[in-house]
Image: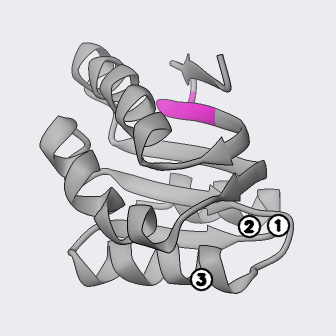
């Protein structure tokens, strides 16, 4: 599986790691599994480790926010996206999510991402 999902009950946070190509079909599988974890634990904080992922298609990126919402990742979920650097495709991903009302912020620093995510 090109992703892992773990829930940390001590800090009430869902940790996701994606490896390889990140496209709409992968997002559908991932979002479905994450939505189950969100529902089971009532957790609304999601740490997305995308440092080993690459976005494949700009068309897919444009449709990701609506797909995530349709599958069950609501706008009220707070999501930190961790990337190695901020190439234009990840910058576009953040912009598209934010423009659709999602709470998404991109980081290159893991500690800064955790601090933002855990601050309510």
Residue 45 percent across, percent down from the top left: 43, 44
Residue positioned 49% across, 76% down in the render: 94
Question: Is 56 or 97 nearer to us in this picture?
Answer: 56
Q: On the image, numbered disc 1 is attached to which residue?
A: 109
Residue 91 disc label: 3
Question: Which image quarter is the C terminus in?
Answer: bottom left
Name the mark nearer the viewer: 1 or 2. 1
Left or right of 17: which side holds 25? left
Magenta span dominant secondary structure: strand
Which residue is tagged 2? 112
111 left or right of 26 in image: right
**Mark 2 and 3 residues: CB-CB less than 8 Å, in contact?**
no
Q: Quadrant of the N terminus?
A: top right
Residues under labels 3 and 1: Cα distance? 15 Å
Q: Earlier in the sequence, mark 3 or mark 1?
A: 3
Most foreground residue, 37 or 17: 17
- Name the foreground residue: 2 vs 45: 2
């Amino acid at each position: 599986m090109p992703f892992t999902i773990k829930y940390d009950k001590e800090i009430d946070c869902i940790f996701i790691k994606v490896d390889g190509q990140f496209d709409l079909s992968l997002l559908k599988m991932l979002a479905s599994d994450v939505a189950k974890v969100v529902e089971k634990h009532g957790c609304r904080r999601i740490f997305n480790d995308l440092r080993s992922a690459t976005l494949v298609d700009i068309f897919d990126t444009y449709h990701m926010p609506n797909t995530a919402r349709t599958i069950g990742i609501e706008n009220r979920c707070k999501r930190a996206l961790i990337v190695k650097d901020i190439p234009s495709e990840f910058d576009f991903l953040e912009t598209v999510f934010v423009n659709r009302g999602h709470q998404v912020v991109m980081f290159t620093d893991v500690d800064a991402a955790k601090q933002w995510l855990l601050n309510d």
